[in-house]
Image: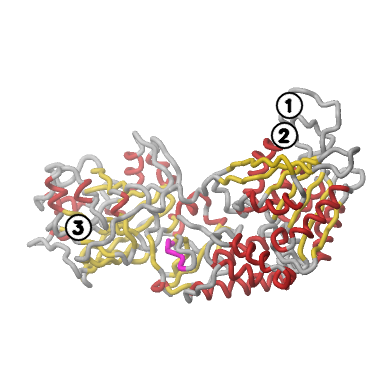
C-alpha cells in the first residue's frame, strides 16, 4: 500500500517565517514539508481542502524536521468555531446538575445547543492557556472532536451530510464557567483569548475509522473517555441542523461536544490553575497538549484567514516606446517592454534609453487571484493569465476602422519568465489575423528566458546544491542576503571585471526579494518552471511552433540556469521548427549569446543587449 502523507500540520517555516503545511509523523515526531505536485509550497489547510490530497506530495527539496524544533500553528484559523453543548448523555446530566447550566432545566436537550467560539480564541498545540484571573475563577477544560467541512452545503440532508465532511481535528473547548452561567448564552464564557486550543493535526475522514475515541488527561490522570457513538446528536444530524438556514463553507469547524469528566462534574469542582497540563487524544489524530499559565500572552491576531491561500492580484507594469527608424524610407517601430512578473517597468529603463526610445508610456496589466496551483506551477499559470489583460493593452487603439496602410512594426521585448506570457500571447497572434481583434507582434525578443527542458544534469545538480546550501544557511541564521547570492551566483565575469556599477545595479535590483532561502527556491523554480509536470515541455514546444513572429533569444554565456548555448539554440530554434503545425517556412529564429554575461544581462551589459536588439529589429 502506498504511503499517505495526510497528517496535515501547520507550522512556521523557519527559513521564510511564513505558515507552511507539512506531514506530522506521529511515530517519529517529525514534520516533513508538503508541496503541490507542481512544486508550489502549501501555506494553509484551506488550500489542502480545496485541492485534494491527490495533488499533494512530500517536498523533495526538504528534509524532515524534529517537531520540537518548529513552532506549531493551529491547523486552521480565521473563522469562529461552530460548537455544540451538552452532546454526550453523561456530560449533559453532569452539566445540568452543576448549577452552571442556564440553557434549560433538563438533562438531555431536545435540540442541539449551538454556540460559537471567537476566532481570536484559537491557539495551537503547545501554546499556553491563560487562566484569566480577572475574568474567571472557574476555568475548565472540555476535550472534543472537531469536524472540518470540506464541501459547501445549504439544507443538507442528514443521509448526505458526511459527503460534506473533509476531516477531523482535536479541540479543547476551554470555558469560564461562571461567565457561561451568568450571561445565559455561552459565547463570552467560551471565547476568551487562548480558549480554543486546536490540533496538532487535521486529517481527512477517509483516513480515519468511522468511530473516533476521545480521551482527556489532566496532570497525568484520565478524566474523559468516550467515542463518537456516544453523541446525542450525530455529526450528520448536526450538519443538517446547522445548514437548515445557513450555508456551511469549506474550512468551517464544528466542535461536537465534550463527554463527562469535566471539572464542574466533580465534588467539589476542580478548576484549572497555572501549571496544569491538559492532553486530549483522538483516534488517529495524535494528542493536543497545552499548559495553563499565569503569564499574560500577547494579543491575538488573525494573520491567516481562509483567503490567505489566494495570492493577491498581480499587476505587471509595461513600457511602450517608439524606436525611430534609421532610414526615412522605413517606419518607426513600436516596442512593448514586458518585465518578469513582480519586477518594475524600470527593469527596462536602461535598455530603452540605450535604444534611444521616445514617446515612453507606462502601462499596467492586472490579473488574479487564483488558487489553481496544485498541478500547474504558479509562474506558468500566471503567464497564461497575464496574456489576456496584456492582449487588451496591445490592441490597436481604434478598433472600429479598417486600416488600408501597413501599420508600424510592433516588437515585444521580454525578460525572464515573462517569456512564457509572451508565448501565450503571440502563439495566438499572426500577422495575417484581423488586427482589430488580435495584436500583431511582428518581432519577439526574449532576454534570459526559461532554460531548455528537461534540465541537463549539471544544471539540475547545481540548483539542488544551491538550495541545500541556502537551507543550511537559513537554519543557522546566516546573514547572507539575496544580493550576496545574486552577486556570487548570477552575475557574469565581464561585469565583475569591468563594471562594478553593473554589479551594484544587480545587487540593488535583488534587494527586497526575500531571504536567501526564498531566493534559492526561486532560482529552482526558474530552472524547473517548464518541466515541473508532464506535458509542460510539449506545451512550450507547441507554442513556439505556433508563434508566427520572428524571434530573437538573448542569453549570457555564463547564465548557468539558461543551459549551454548549444542547448539554447536547439530548444528555441530547432525544436520549435520541428514541432510547428501547418505548412510553410518557420519565421526567423535567432540566438545571441553575450560572452561573459550572467543572468542579469540588461544590467551587466546593456550595450551588448541593445546592439543585439537593434541589429535584429533592423534586419
Measured in 3D between alpha carbons, the distance from the residue under mark 2 to the one under mark 1, in whole angstroms, is: 8 Å
The foreground one among 282 and 614 is: 614
Q: Are there few (<14), some (14-19), or many (20+) residues within 10 Å of tag 2?
A: some
Q: Which residue is mark 1?
A: 399
Q: Which residue is mark 3?
A: 260
Q: Position of residue 240 (x, y in %)?
A: 35, 40
Which badge, 1 or 3, is on the more N-terminal residue? Answer: 3
Whether tag 2 and tag 1 are in contact, CB under 8 A, the answer is: yes
Q: Let me know if residue 217 appears in the view.
A: no
Which residue range is magenta in the image? 9-14
Main secondary-structure element of the magenta-colored stretch: strand
Give the colour scheme of this rendering: secondary structure
Q: Quadrant location of residue 300?
A: bottom left
Q: Which residue is mark 2?
A: 395
Q: Are there few (<14), some (14-19), or many (20+) residues within 10 Å of tag 1?
A: few
> For the image shown, how many numbered marks are present on the structure?
3
Q: Position of residue 265 (x, y in %)?
A: 13, 58
Q: Residue furthest left?
A: 268
Q: Quadrant location of residue 323?
A: top right
Name the front one of labels 1 and 3: 1
Which residue corresponds to the image point at 20% horizontal and 47% vertical from the top-left?
A: 188
Amino acid at each position: 500500500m502506498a504511503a499517505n502523507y495526510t497528517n496535515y500540520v501547520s507550522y512556521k517555516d523557519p527559513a521564510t517565517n511564513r505558515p507552511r503545511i507539512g506531514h506530522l509523523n506521529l511515530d517519529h515526531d517529525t514534520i516533513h514539508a508538503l508541496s503541490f505536485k507542481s512544486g508550489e509550497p502549501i501555506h494553509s489547510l484551506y488550500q489542502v481542502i480545496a485541492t485534494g490530497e491527490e495533488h499533494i506530495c512530500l517536498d523533495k527539496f526538504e528534509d524532515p524536521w524534529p517537531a520540537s524544533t518548529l513552532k506549531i500553528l493551529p491547523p486552521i484559523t480565521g473563522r469562529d468555531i461552530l460548537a455544540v453543548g451538552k452532546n454526550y448523555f453523561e456530560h449533559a446530566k453532569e452539566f445540568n446538575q452543576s448549577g452552571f447550566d442556564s440553557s434549560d432545566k433538563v438533562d438531555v436537550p431536545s435540540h442541539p445547543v449551538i454556540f460559537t467560539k471567537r476566532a481570536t480564541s484559537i491557539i495551537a498545540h503547545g501554546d499556553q492557556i491563560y487562566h484569566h484571573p480577572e475574568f474567571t475563577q472557574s476555568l475548565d477544560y472540555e476535550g472534543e472532536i472537531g469536524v472540518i467541512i470540506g464541501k459547501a452545503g445549504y439544507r443538507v440532508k442528514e443521509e448526505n451530510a458526511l459527503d460534506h465532511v473533509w476531516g477531523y481535528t482535536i479541540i479543547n473547548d476551554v470555558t469560564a464557567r461562571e461567565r457561561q452561567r451568568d450571561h445565559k448564552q455561552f459565547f463570552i464564557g467560551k471565547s476568551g483569548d487562548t480558549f480554543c486550543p486546536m490540533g496538532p493535526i487535521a486529517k481527512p475522514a477517509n483516513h480515519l475509522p468511522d468511530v473516533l475515541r476521545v480521551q482527556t488527561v489532566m496532570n497525568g490522570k484520565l478524566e474523559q473517555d468516550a467515542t463518537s457513538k456516544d453523541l446525542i446528536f450525530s455529526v450528520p444530524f448536526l450538519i443538517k441542523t446547522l445548514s437548515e438556514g445557513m450555508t456551511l463553507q469549506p474550512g468551517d469547524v464544528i466542535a461536537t461536544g465534550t463527554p463527562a469528566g469535566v471539572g464542574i462534574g466533580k465534588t467539589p469542582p476542580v478548576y484549572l490553575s497555572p501549571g496544569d497540563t491538559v492532553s486530549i487524544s483522538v483516534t488517529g489524530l495524535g494528542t493536543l497538549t497545552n499548559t495553563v499559565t499565569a503569564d499574560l500572552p500577547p494579543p491575538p491576531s488573525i494573520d491567516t484567514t481562509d483567503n490567505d491561500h489566494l495570492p493577491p492580484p498581480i499587476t505587471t507594469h509595461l513600457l511602450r516606446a517608439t524606436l525611430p527608424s534609421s532610414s526615412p524610407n522605413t517606419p518607426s517601430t513600436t516596442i512593448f517592454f514586458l518585465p518578469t512578473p513582480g519586477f518594475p517597468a524600470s527593469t527596462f529603463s536602461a535598455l530603452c534609453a540605450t535604444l534611444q526610445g521616445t514617446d515612453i508610456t507606462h502601462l499596467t496589466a492586472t490579473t488574479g487571484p487564483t488558487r489553481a496551483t496544485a498541478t500547474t506551477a504558479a509562474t506558468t499559470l500566471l503567464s497564461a493569465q497575464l496574456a489576456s489583460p496584456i492582449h487588451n493593452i496591445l490592441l490597436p487603439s481604434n478598433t472600429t476602422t479598417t486600416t488600408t496602410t501597413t501599420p508600424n512594426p510592433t516588437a515585444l521585448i521580454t525578460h525572464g519568465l515573462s517569456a512564457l506570457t509572451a508565448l501565450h500571447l503571440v502563439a495566438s497572434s499572426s500577422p495575417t489575423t484581423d488586427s482589430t481583434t488580435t495584436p500583431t507582434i511582428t518581432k519577439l525578443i526574449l532576454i534570459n528566458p526559461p532554460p531548455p527542458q528537461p534540465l541537463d544534469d549539471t544544471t539540475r545538480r547545481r540548483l539542488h546544491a544551491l538550495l541545500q546550501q541556502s537551507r543550511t544557511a537559513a537554519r543557522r541564521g546566516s546573514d547572507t542576503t539575496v544580493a550576496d547570492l545574486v552577486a556570487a551566483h548570477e552575475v557574469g565575469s565581464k561585469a565583475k571585471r569591468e563594471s562594478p556599477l553593473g554589479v551594484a545595479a544587480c545587487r540593488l535590483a535583488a534587494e527586497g526579494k526575500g531571504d536567501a532561502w526564498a531566493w534559492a527556491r526561486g532560482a529552482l523554480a526558474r530552472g524547473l518552471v517548464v518541466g515541473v509536470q508532464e506535458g509542460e515541455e510539449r506545451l512550450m514546444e507547441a507554442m513556439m511552433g505556433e508563434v508566427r513572429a520572428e524571434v530573437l533569444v538573448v542569453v549570457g554565456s555564463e547564465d548557468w540556469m539558461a543551459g549551454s548555448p548549444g542547448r539554447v539554440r536547439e530548444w528555441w530554434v530547432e525544436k520549435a521548427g520541428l514541432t510547428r503545425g501547418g505548412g510553410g517556412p518557420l519565421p526567423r529564429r535567432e540566438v545571441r549569446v553575450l560572452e561573459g554575461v550572467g543572468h542579469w544581462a540588461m544590467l551587466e551589459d546593456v550595450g551588448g543587449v541593445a546592439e543585439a536588439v537593434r541589429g535584429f529589429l533592423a534586419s
